[in-house]
Image (spheres, rainbow, N blue to C red):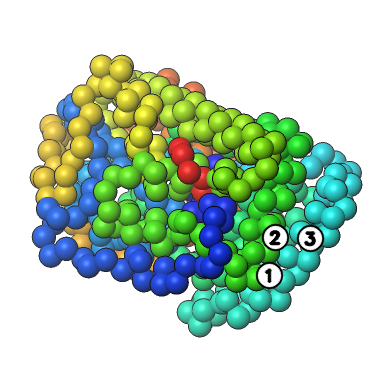
């Protein structure tokens, strides 16, 4: 994530309120794996119908950090569902190209033309620092997979002078040591998309790239300059060792694995934009920060939840005999005006499915041999197929419409066609595609 997380985007990042960076954060996510399934945290909800459909709350971190803490009934629900939907289509090259286009300045413009000179110079200096440090941030495992610092920097920050300032701000937030070390392992959303592809399930998306991208481009120039300046101040403080971050990616993982269904923490992961509200800001800047927060909360959370909920309803009504598995950022199910609330207002019964509760299989229309969860979900990192740097230069989140996969007897129609993603390449006889996770995971904000 999911924006999107694609929009795609994600690391928890709040502006500093203290003097020193917090110690011991990396161990925060290492809570004890519970011996009983019933003791695990669950982000699964059942839409009660026959066959049942499911909502599953994902998180935009490497799936290997959370997989063992996901209950078996969530994995079983994924296996039983014939159709899997995400926010965006994480496996479609069109998603990446559309995101790239959305982030670019108008033709002939570059950042040096639009940014104040002092901010441009600070930005350039910070990116030079990141490029210098990145080789020391890379892990032996990453190098063993052929993922090197120069390539990774170009994949994330390549062509940065042509990007809109708001996207540069998000990019800077993702260029941290912790974030760089996580590259090369698919985030949970992407891993599920890969598995759905491998199992030849029907897949689709409930959002279009433009719906996640345009709200960020809708911030006015003064708001964007404020946000970029605050982001650079934060990164400069981190480099100086004088920053305390209230929430980190490790906190996010901990709450997902071992915590409660916290709307405060997990909503950061879904909105993927930093929170700029800080009590130490001068009055006028505090007003600007509050205006940005209000705008993004409305555009990236509440409006999206309403839109996603209505599109889920349309799919359920169009295909009453299909079992859907909707995998969206967990923050979309937390707090007020959630996707769950939208479905309930439309008359659907949606209930939380605690870990350990058996999954209702519903009526079986046809018999098929399904692999068991243990044979499908061995958490091995898929072989990476490395896309071009240009293709991966940004976010991580969701896609357009339902696509009939090989082996499907149901061509898309009706509600599917509303959200259809176009096939932009001929189908070839070859092994199933494999996908790379170099998406830039954009940082989060404090309310989804």
Viewer-nearest of discs 3 and 2 = 3
Distance from disc 1 to disc 3, alpha carbons, whole Å, reads 12 Å
Q: Residues within 10 Å of mark 3 (few under 14, many from 20)?
A: some
Residue at 64% over, 74% down:
134
Residue labelled with disc 2: 157
Assign the C terminus to one quadrant of the image: top left
Left or right of 314, for residue 272: right
Residue labelled with disc 1: 130
Distance from disc 3 to disc 2, alpha carbons, whole Å, reads 15 Å
Res. 122 mark:
3
**Whole-percent x and y of residue 295?**
59, 30
- The picture quadrant where one finds residue 299 is top right
Q: Nearer the viewer, residue 238 or 40?
A: 238
**Whole-percent x and y of residue 160?**
75, 55
Left or right of 287, for residue 76: left
Q: Is residue 389 visible?
A: no
Q: Is residue 48 above or below residue 110?
A: above
């Amino acid at each position: 994530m999911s924006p999107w997380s694609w929009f795609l985007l994600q690391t928890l990042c709040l502006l500093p309120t203290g003097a020193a960076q917090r110690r011991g954060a990396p161990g925060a996510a290492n809570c004890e794996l519970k011996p009983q399934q019933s003791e695990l945290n669950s982000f699964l909800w059942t839409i009660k119908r026959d066959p049942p459909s499911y909502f599953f709350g994902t998180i935009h971190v490497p799936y290997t950090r959370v997989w063992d803490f996901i209950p078996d009934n969530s994995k079983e629900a994924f296996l039983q569902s014939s159709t899997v939907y995400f926010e965006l289509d994480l496996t479609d090259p069109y998603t990446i190209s559309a995101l790239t286009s959305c982030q670019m300045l108008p033709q002939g413009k570059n950042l040096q033309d639009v940014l104040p000179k002092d901010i441009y110079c600070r930005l350039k200096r910070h990116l030079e620092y990141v490029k210098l440090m990145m080789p020391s941030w890379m892990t032996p495992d990453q190098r063993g997979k052929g993922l090197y610092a120069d390539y990774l920097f170009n994949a994330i920050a390549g062509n940065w002078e042509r990007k809109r300032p708001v996207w540069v701000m998000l990019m800077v937030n993702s260029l941290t040591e912790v974030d760089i070390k996580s590259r090369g392992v698919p985030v949970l959303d992407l891993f599920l998309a890969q598995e759905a592809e491998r199992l030849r399930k029907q897949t689709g998306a409930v959002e279009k790239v433009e719906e996640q991208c345009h709200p960020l481009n809708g911030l006015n120039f003064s708001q964007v300059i404020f946000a970029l300046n605050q982001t650079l101040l934060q990164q400069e403080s981190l480099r100086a060792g004088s920053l305390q971050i209230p929430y980190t990616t490790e906190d996010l993982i901990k709450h997902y694995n071992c915590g409660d269904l916290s709307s405060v923490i997990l909503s950061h992961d879904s909105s993927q934009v930093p929170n700029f509200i800080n009590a130490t800001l001068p009055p006028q800047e505090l007003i600007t920060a509050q205006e940005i927060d209000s705008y993004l909360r409305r555009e990236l959370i509440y409006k999206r939840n309403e839109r996603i909920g209505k599109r889920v309803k349309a799919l359920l009504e169009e295909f009453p005999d299909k079992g859907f598995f909707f995998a969206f950022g967990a923050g979309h199910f937390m707090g007020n005006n959630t996707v769950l609330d939208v479905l309930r207002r439309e008359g659907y019964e949606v209930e939380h499915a605690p870990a350990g509760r058996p999954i209702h299989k519903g009526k079986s229309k046809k018999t098929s041999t399904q692999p068991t969860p243990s044979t499908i979900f061995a958490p091995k990192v898929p072989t990476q197929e490395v896309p071009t740097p240009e293709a991966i230069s940004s976010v991580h989140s969701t896609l357009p419409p339902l696509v009939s996969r090989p082996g499907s007897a149901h061509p898309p129609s009706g509600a599917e066609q509303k959200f259809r993603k176009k096939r932009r390449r001929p189908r070839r006889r070859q092994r199933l595609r494999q996908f790379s996770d170099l998406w830039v995971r954009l940082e989060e904000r404090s309310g989804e």
